[in-house]
Amino acid sequence: MPARKSKTERRLLGTWRSDRRRTLLDWRFKQGVTRSQRERLATIFGKLTLTYTGVRVRGVYGDQRFTRPYEVLASDSDSVAICYYDSVTEEWRIQHIHFEGDRYWIALGPNREWFRKVKVRMVYRRAIRRALARKALLKTDARYLTREEAHGRTSLR
């Protein structure tokens, strides 16, 4: 029997971030939920970032990180169904992802969580900010060399 070739869904590839505003706009709270409970729930959304490659999804939520394989089961004009291993429930799960423009949503019970496609420029800026925030490996007086200093050093040539 030949090996099964994995499908790739191009619309899914890239980085996606939870869209708190859109999620809460559509969210239907149960009767009797207090304002403080709504505010506490609101803090959950907008923090999860998912990056899909052809065979893996990487997630970051605060200081938690995970990577897990996934497989595209089927797709149509506005959605895709994937299968992934959930380490919490220790079982394979099917997730139906519905696309609308540069966003997608997944069902959370009777509600939806929305994700927005992260532009490459935003990813680049975030990476630059992280790199600049790191401490320097070399101890320096934290200034650039002048042109004369750089030309005067033979070790830099």
Image (spheres, rainbow, N blue to C red):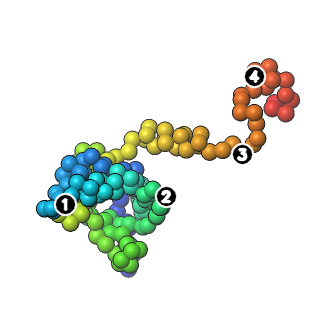
Q: Which amino acid does label 4 sit on?
A: Thr
Q: How far apart are marks 1 and 2 (CA)?
A: 29 Å
Residue 137: assigned label? 3
* Residue 25 place in picture, x, y as percent: 20, 48
As drawn, 1 above or below 59:
below
Residue 157 visible in the displayed image: yes
Quadrant where the N terminus sits is bottom left
Local crowd size for mark 4, using a 10 Å CA cut-off: few (<14), some (14–19), many (≥20): few
Counting labels gives: 4
Number of the label disc, if any, that sits on residue 63: 2
Residue 6: which disc?
none
Judge whether 42 appears above or below 93 on screen. Answer: above
Q: As drawn, is 152 to the left or to the right of 80? A: right
Amino acid type, label 1:
Val
Return the residue nearer the eye: 76 or 70: 70
- Distance, label 4 to label 1, CA atoms, is 62 Å
Rendered residue at 27%/46% (across/down): 21
Label 4 SS: loop
Chain-order first, disc 4 or disc 1: 1
Residue of label 4:
146
Task: Estimate the spatial distance between the alpha carbons at disc 4 and disc 3, rounded to whole Å.
Answer: 21 Å
Residue 128 falls left or right of residue 112: right
Residue at 34 percent across and 54 percent down: it is 43
- Helix, strand or loop at disc 1? loop
> Which of marks 2 and 3 precedes in the sequence?
2
For label 1, the residue is 33
Residue 108, given in percent of the width and then of the height, sits at 24, 63
Choose mark 4 or mark 2, whichever is in front. 2
Position of the C terminus, as image quadrant, is: top right
Q: Can residue 113 be seen in this view?
A: no
